[in-house]
Amino acid sequence: MRITAIGIATFLACAVLPVAGSLSAMSASADLTAILDVCEATSLDEAANRGEQLGWPKAPEDRDWRAGFERHNGGPVQVVGWRRTEREGDGLLSYWVASGRHPHTACSFSTDQPGLLEALRDRFGTPDTFEEHDDIITAFWKREEAEISLTRVGASSSLNLSRRG
C-alpha cells in the first residue's frame, strides 16, 4: 500500500506539476500580450477598453504625478491605469495622452515578474540597441512612430512605449 501511495505521488509530481508550471507561464505570457495590446492602443478610450480585459483593479489617480507632469509639459494629461495586485512589483500599467509643449501618448509598465524582455522580442523583434552590464539590461526599439524602451535591474523591469504627436 505504501509503495502504491509513493508511486501515485511520484506520478502526480512528474505529470501534473510541470503542466501547472507551464499553465502559469502561459498565463504570464497571455498577460504580457494583453499588456502590450494596451500599450499599442492609439487612444485613451481604446487603451481603457483593452485594459479592462486584464481584469485588474484600476489604480488610484496619483495627483502629485499629474500636477508635476502638467507643470513640466505645460498642458493637460489624461491618464488611466491598473495595478495587478496591491503587492509592490507585481505590475503597474498606465497609459496617458498629453497635450502641451510635447504632445504624446505613452504607456508604462513595471513589474518584477519574469518574461517582459522575451515578450518584447516576440512582439517587436530584435532590439535596435541592447546593452547588458552585470544585472542591468537596457533595450530600445524604434518601430514606425513608436519608441519602445526596456530597463531591467535585477528582477525589476520597466517598459515605456511612446508616440509623438
Image (cartoon, rainbow, N blue to C red):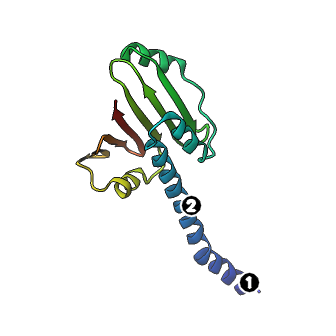
Mark toward the viewer: 1 or 2: 2
Residue 137, percent from left and from top: 30, 45
The numbered dot on residue 118 is none
Q: Dot 2: within a 10 Å radius of its alpha carbon, few (fewer than 14), some, or many (20 or more) residues?
A: few
Residues 18 and 163: in front is 163
Q: Dot 1: within a 10 Å radius of its alpha carbon, few (fewer than 14), some, or many (20 or more) residues?
A: few
The residue that disc 1 covers is 2
Q: Is residue 127 left or right of residue 32?
A: left
Q: Which of the two labelled residues, at mark 1 and mark 2, occupies the earlier sequence position?
A: 1
Quarter of the image containing the C terminus? Answer: top left
Q: Amino acid at mark 2?
A: Ser
Farthest-out residue, right? 1
Residue 100, percent from left and from top: 37, 18
Residues 15 and 93: in front is 93
Q: Residue sitting at 54 percent across and 36 percent down?
A: 45
Q: Residue sitting at 63 percent across and 46 percent down?
A: 55
Question: Looking at the image, is 84 positioned above or below residue 96?
Answer: below
The residue that disc 2 covers is 24
Q: Residue sitting at 57 percent across and 38 percent down?
A: 83
Q: Secondary structure at mark 2?
A: helix
Q: Amino acid at mark 1?
A: Arg
